[in-house]
Image (cartoon, rainbow, N blue to C red):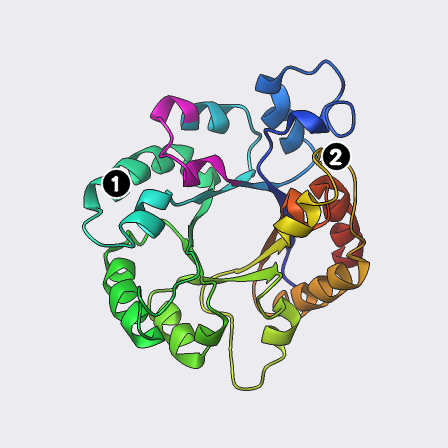
């Protein structure tokens, strides 16, 4: 059985003070504290802007050996330019990401849902994705998340596998569950050197119930159980990383605790 590493999507949450973080802990110490409890973290802030080299060096130096970061690729690449004419943005992002050294677990391409006005078909999207993957540096693992459920096909899997890109499996309101995908006989979702699961849930449903993301507001026990089963299937073949968003159930650390208890 391969290892499973579970962490949160981000760490800069003031509402965790006194609940997860000790009361009075300075926000600048949040990452160091989190890294004492989890082996990995997904960095959400890099989606909004490419990090400075000084910022990345700080992340690296405030975490212990063996800790891993998944950096979301900036939206200027995935959403605004949608992989076209973005060489400068990619170079700037990678120049910072490389400073993590062996703590750089991967970079994550999180795409939006695309309507037919953007891409007429999956093949049109793959025509855009394939050359981007081919040009991506081989020493930086890349994970890819698509949000068009009709694109979840062997053709997408084959494209990712040709470039050893990891297929991100999200537990998200409108997407097929990770368990349903790993159980499909016609589909092999293991496309890279490890598997990547994201527990995202339904942001609107959580926001309707709370403005402070410091407690569970939706019981997703059955869904967490199914995600754990998917992870157990995946770990028979490859290592697995899983990341939990606050909006999955209201409070990511508690969901992480439940998922770890089920996956060991």
User: Which marked residue is nearer to the observer: mark 2 or mark 1?
Assistant: 2
| Residue at the (74%, 62%) spot, across then down | 223
Residue 234: x %, y % from top left: 61, 68
Residue 38: x %, y % from top left: 66, 39
Where is mark 1, residue-wise? 89
The answer to whether residue 119 is above or below residue 74 is below
| Residue at the (57%, 86%) spot, across then down | 185
Circle 1: is it few (<14), some (14-19), or many (20+) Cα within 10 Å? some
Whether residue 50 is in magenta: the answer is yes
**Total of numbered circles in the picture?**
2
Image quarter for residue 201? bottom right
Work out how far the residue at label 2 is from the one at label 1, CA to CA, in angstroms: 35 Å
Whether residue 199 is in magenta: the answer is no
Do labels 2 and 1 touch, CB within 8 Å? no
Outermost residue toward the bottom? 186
Image quarter for residue 82? bottom left
214 or 163: nearer the viewer: 214
| Residue at the (37%, 37%) spot, across then down | 97
Q: Which residues are magenta?
A: 43-55
Where is mark 2, residue-wise? 214
Which tag, 2 or 1, sits closer to the chain's start? 1
Residue 203: x %, y % from top left: 62, 49
Q: Quadrant of the C terminus?
A: bottom right
Residue 114: x %, y % from top left: 39, 63
């Amino acid at each position: 059985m391969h290892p499973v590493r579970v962490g949160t999507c981000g760490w800069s949450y003031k509402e965790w003070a006194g609940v997860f973080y000790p009361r009075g802990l300075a926000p600048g110490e949040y990452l160091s504290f989190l890294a004492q409890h989890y082996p990995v973290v997904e960095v959400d802030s890099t989606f909004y802007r490419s990090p400075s080299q000084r910022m990345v060096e700080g992340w690296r130096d405030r975490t212990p050996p063996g800790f891993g970061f998944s950096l979301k690729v900036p939206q200027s690449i995935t959403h605004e330019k949608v992989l076209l004419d973005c060489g400068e943005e990619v170079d700037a992002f990678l120049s910072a990401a490389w400073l993590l050294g062996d703590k750089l677990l991967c970079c994550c391409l999180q795409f939006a849902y695309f309507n037919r006005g953007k891409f007429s078909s999956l093949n049109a999207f793959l025509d855009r994705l394939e050359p981007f993957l081919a040009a991506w540096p081989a020493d930086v693992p890349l994970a890819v998340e698509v949000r068009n459920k009709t694109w979840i096909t062997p053709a997408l899997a084959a494209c990712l596998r040709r470039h050893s890109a990891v297929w991100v499996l999200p537990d998200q309101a409108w997407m097929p569950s990770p368990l349903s995908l790993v159980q499909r006989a016609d589909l092999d979702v293991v496309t890279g050197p490890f598997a990547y699961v994201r527990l995202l849930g339904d942001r609107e449903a959580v926001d309707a119930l709370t403005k402070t993301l410091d407690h569970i507001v939706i019981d997703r026990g059955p869904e967490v159980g199914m995600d754990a089963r998917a992870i157990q299937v995946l770990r028979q073949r490859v290592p697995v990383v899983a990341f939990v968003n606050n909006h999955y159930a209201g409070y990511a650390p508690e969901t992480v605790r439940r998922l770890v208890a089920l996956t060991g």
